[in-house]
Amino acid sequence: MSRLQDKTILITGAANGIGAAAATRFAAEGATVIATDIDETAGKAVVEQITAAGRSAEFLAHDVTSEDAWVQVTDQVRAVHGRIDVLVNNAGIYLIAPLADTSVEDWNRLMAVNVTGTFLGMKHTAPHMAASGGGAIINLSSIAGLVGVAGHTLYGASKGAVRTMTKDVAAEYAAANVRVNSLHPTYVNTAMATYGAAAAGTTIEALGPVLSPLGRIAEPADVVNFLVFLASDEAAYLTGSEYNLDGGGSTLISVG
């Protein structure tokens, strides 16, 4: 397994869920993984598991909402490793709330992580990728960035912004061989899905047949499989695109 051999890959929100699964798999595919998160304890634990298996990874504490933090992280990675080949903008938070109950404080907090964090990641990696001959940026959006869902005005707005920013930066940096794509998963079997199921008064298991004709929600590995592809040279001709990873959920309609 060496589809990402010798690539230096920065993954935000890597302390748990999709980010932790991606860090583990990327390292197994031969990459040097820089795992970042605001949760230092959990992030270091992920890296310790990776290095214990003989793979290459390190942890950096990182608040994605801070431009100074992005400068420090990217400068440190380039000083040690020379380049950043792939950025996975994975860090994100989730809120379900009726429109009338969504506060400006909620809006600012979630947008800071989901939108500003993604923007800053691209701002501070794309120019360096361009200067070093190219690279790949993968932005984790959501199915909520493609379709409307009650109670998701704030979250959907953030993920829709990620979708459009992805296309804008892809257009700007295509000539420099910097590929930028967005991935739009349905519920993935992580803490976010547990929260979503509870908010809907149901369980993850019960949500599966409702959300997908495959009868289950996504597992982190389902997402990571596609992340590996987009990060690899196999995806050399793909940029500015959105990839719907919903297990066929968009084929389901209600009649009557």
Image (spheres, rainbow, N blue to C red):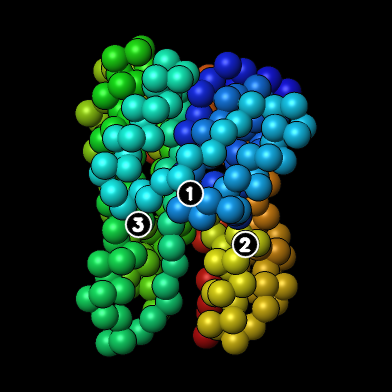
> Which residue in the rendered view is the most extreme toward the top?
133
Can see residue 168?
yes
Point out residue 229 in the picture as x, y percentages from the top left corner.
Answer: 58, 31
| Closer to us: 242 or 80 | 80
Point out residue 193 in the picture as x, y percentages from the top left corner.
Answer: 58, 68
**Residue beneath disc 3:** 113
Alpha carbon distance from label 2 to label 1: 16 Å
Point out residue 185 in the picture as x, y percentages from the top left corner.
Answer: 53, 54
Rendered image: mark on residue 190: 2
Where residue 212 sits, quadrant-wise, is: bottom right
| Crowd around label 3: few <14 · some 14–19 · many ≥20 (10 Å) | many
Q: Secondary structure at mark 1?
A: strand
Q: Is residue 137 above or below residue 83?
A: below
Rendered image: mark on residue 226: none
**Which amino acid, mark 3?**
Val
Q: Are marks 2 and 3 in contact (CB under 8 Å)?
A: no
**Which amino acid, mark 1?**
Asp
